[in-house]
């Protein structure tokens, strides 16, 4: 199982109502239904993803995180999941505020632009870093709002979320979960999974 | 008509939303496939404004393929080897179900004495048919456009009788623009001197011109600007230059005239008035304290809401309103907005993305139901 999925599943109470934003072909939704008896809804922008989900019997809405979160009523979910998507949205602040409105808790995973390799690439080459995880060039990347763990923690607090846990992930290795952002977490984590709770 | 219609006439009257009582009620319908032992494989297909019960196979009047022949049939997407497919002519229609051409006790056609009907009345008439066919619960109710309105009404009125629902290219209420286009059509019919205040059957005339214009105006709303441009552009009809007259110089004019003329051969003018009125009156939320969410509150099945990007008749925004309400009601809802330039009529055409999704949805639901 993917390490970020594993980390997410650990955070889910049995029978929760969950919204998976950017659910792709519904792999995580299926896991949540099977392993956790969750009642899951998905939001997905691609036709291929939506069709794959519908064929699996999953309840998925075709739509865009930037535009269509208004479809979901206030407090309609126990948990909202946003995997590897926040950095690709037009307005991360608005998206996180919408998630705050919709769900009690949120799990947000993102690539960490503060990772030492990225810092090093930028420092030494003086060019926007291109890595295995972030393989696009600056002019054609969908990731228009890259940030560091520190940056995202600031935004979470600003949108009235309490940070319950930050789980660093490096490749296939999960680091020890922390509750506060620190210099070393921000330096050493390639990706992070944030567990947020409404204040 | 080349063969006998299948019809049921009920002993029970149908009390209409208007308060009027319809008696006797007759429903004309077609079926394909076989109802299984558990009676769990029935699909009700609901037809649109100008559709009828001849979904697939050769239409007895037009001699052309039925309106959803590409989707419904043996081995097709809605497989009649697997499902028992039912389609009934709607109340107010002109293919055998009770409508304004019914004879009154005095032997004259009802014409405008026929009571005003609603989408909800249509659905309750269908429910009587389903009961008569001894089906407790439909596996699926599927329909596009006005058929989609009936699907929405079904899960609102009979939430326990539907396992899954597919409303396509539709809306939960008629917009001012929808009503406006219908009113143009109705006025065209009524302005035809041969309409005779609705009494044309008794007076042996027919408002062909009016009905034809109504169809022409409506037909424009079924197509997108891009589709019209791609198909016709400013191309001339069988001529090299403009005639400087009012003949059908342009292909689009000729096409619309043809659409209008062929329509009057198979449709009744008063039926057109009654059914468009029923659509105009449709506002599902209104009957549920103004809340569409309440309308879907009792439905425990799954729904797949489909819209088409270039449909300006029932645009994707109308489907989003349906999805939002279903989401709030806790319905197991999926939705897709198919990217196409073919406008409202896309739901009748070969749209692979739509068909893949519909097929996937039905298969997953059939698995869940064990058929």
Image (tube, grey):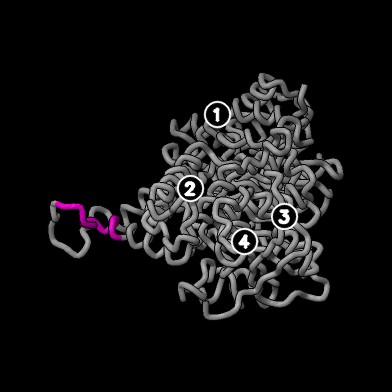
Q: Which residue is mark 3?
A: B124
Res A195 → quadrant: top right
Residues at circles 4 and 2 in contact by the CB criterion of under 8 Å: no
* B58 versus B260 height, above or below: below
Identify the chain of the residue marked 2, using the numbered disc in the image: B
Which is nearer the N-term, disc 4 or disc 2?
Answer: 4
Res B124 → quadrant: bottom right
Q: Which residue is mark 4?
A: B106
Badge nearest the viewer, 2 or 3: 3
The x, y position of residue B245, in whole percent, is 16, 52
- Left of B210 or right of it: where is A79? right
Q: Which residue is mark 1?
A: A91
Circle 4 SS class: loop
Residue B239, which numbered label?
none
Circle 3 SS class: helix
Q: Which residue is mark 2?
A: B309
Query: Would you call the spot at circle 2 few (<14 residues within 10 Å), some (14-19), or many (20 or more)?
Result: many
* Segment tinted magenta in the rendering: B245-254
Identify the chain of the residue marked 3, using the numbered disc in the image: B
Circle 2 SS class: loop
Q: Are marks 4 and 3 on the same chain?
A: yes
* B63 versus B292 height, above or below: below
The x, y position of residue B214, in whole percent, is 41, 51
Task: Tell me what residue is drawn at x 70 percent, y 41 percent.
Answer: B327
Q: Is residue B253 magenta?
A: yes
Badge nearest the viewer, 1 or 4: 4
């Amino acid at each position: 199982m993917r390490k970020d999925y594993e980390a997410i599943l650990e955070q889910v109470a049995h029978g929760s109502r969950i919204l998976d934003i950017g659910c792709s072909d519904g792999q995580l939704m299926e896991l949540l239904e099977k392993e956790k008896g969750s009642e899951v809804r998905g939001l997905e922008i691609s036709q291929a993803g939506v069709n794959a989900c519908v064929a699996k019997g999953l309840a998925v809405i075709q739509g865009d995180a930037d535009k269509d979160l208004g479809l979901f009523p206030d407090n309609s979910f126990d948990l909202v999941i946003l995997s590897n998507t926040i950095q690709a949205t037009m307005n991360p602040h608005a998206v996180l505020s919408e998630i705050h409105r919709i769900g009690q808790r949120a799990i947000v995973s993102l690539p960490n632009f503060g990772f030492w390799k990225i810092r090093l690439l930028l420092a030494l080459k003086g060019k926007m870093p291109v890595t295995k995880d972030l393989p696009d060039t600056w002019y054609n990347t969908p990731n228009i709002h890259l940030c560091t763990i520190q940056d995202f923690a600031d935004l979470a607090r600003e949108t009235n979320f309490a940070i319950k846990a930050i789980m660093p992930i490096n490749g296939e290795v999960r680091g020890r979960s922390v509750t506060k952002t620190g210099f070393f977490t921000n330096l050493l984590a390639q990706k992070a999974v944030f567990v947020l709770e409404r204040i | 008509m080349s063969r006998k219609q299948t019809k049921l006439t009920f002993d029970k009257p149908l009390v209409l939303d208007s308060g009027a009582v319809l008696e006797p009620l007759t429903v004309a319908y077609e079926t394909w496939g076989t109802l299984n032992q558990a009676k769990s494989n029935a699909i009700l297909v609901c037809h649109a404004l100008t559709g009828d019960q001849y979904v697939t196979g050769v239409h007895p009047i037009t001699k052309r393929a039925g309106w959803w022949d590409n989707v419904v049939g043996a081995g097709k997407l809605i497989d009649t080897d697997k499902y028992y497919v039912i389609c009934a002519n709607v109340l107010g229609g002109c293919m055998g179900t009770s409508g304004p051409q019914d004879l009154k006790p005095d032997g004259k056609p009802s014409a405008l004495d026929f009571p005003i009907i609603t989408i909800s009345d249509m659905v309750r008439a269908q429910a009587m048919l389903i009961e008569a066919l001894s089906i407790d619960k439909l596996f699926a109710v599927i329909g596009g456009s006005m058929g989609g309105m009936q699907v929405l009404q079904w899960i609102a009125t009979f939430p326990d009788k539907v396992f899954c629902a597919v409303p396509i290219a539709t809306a939960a209420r008629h917009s001012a623009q929808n009503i406006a286009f219908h009113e143009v059509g109705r006025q065209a019919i009524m302005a035809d001197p041969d309409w005779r205040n609705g009494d044309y059957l008794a007076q042996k005339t027919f408002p062909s011109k009016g009905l034809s214009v109504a169809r022409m105006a409506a037909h424009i709303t079924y197509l997108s600007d891009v589709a019209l441009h791609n198909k016709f552009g400013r191309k001339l009809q069988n001529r090299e230059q403009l005639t400087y007259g009012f003949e059908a110089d342009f292909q689009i004019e000729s096409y619309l005239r043809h659409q209008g003329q062929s329509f009057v051969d198979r449709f009744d003018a008063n039926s057109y008035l009654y059914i468009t009125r029923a659509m105009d009156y449709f506002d599902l939320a209104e009957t549920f304290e103004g809340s569409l969410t309440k309308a879907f509150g009792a439905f425990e099945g799954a729904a797949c809401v489909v819209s088409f990007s270039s449909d300006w008749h029932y645009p994707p925004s109308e489907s989003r309103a349906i999805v939002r309400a279903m989401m709030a009601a806790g319905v197991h809802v999926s939705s897709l907005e198919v990217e196409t330039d073919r406008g409202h009529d896309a739901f009748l055409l070969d749209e692979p993305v739509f068909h893949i999704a519909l097929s996937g949805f039905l298969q997953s639901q059939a698995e869940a139901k064990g058929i």
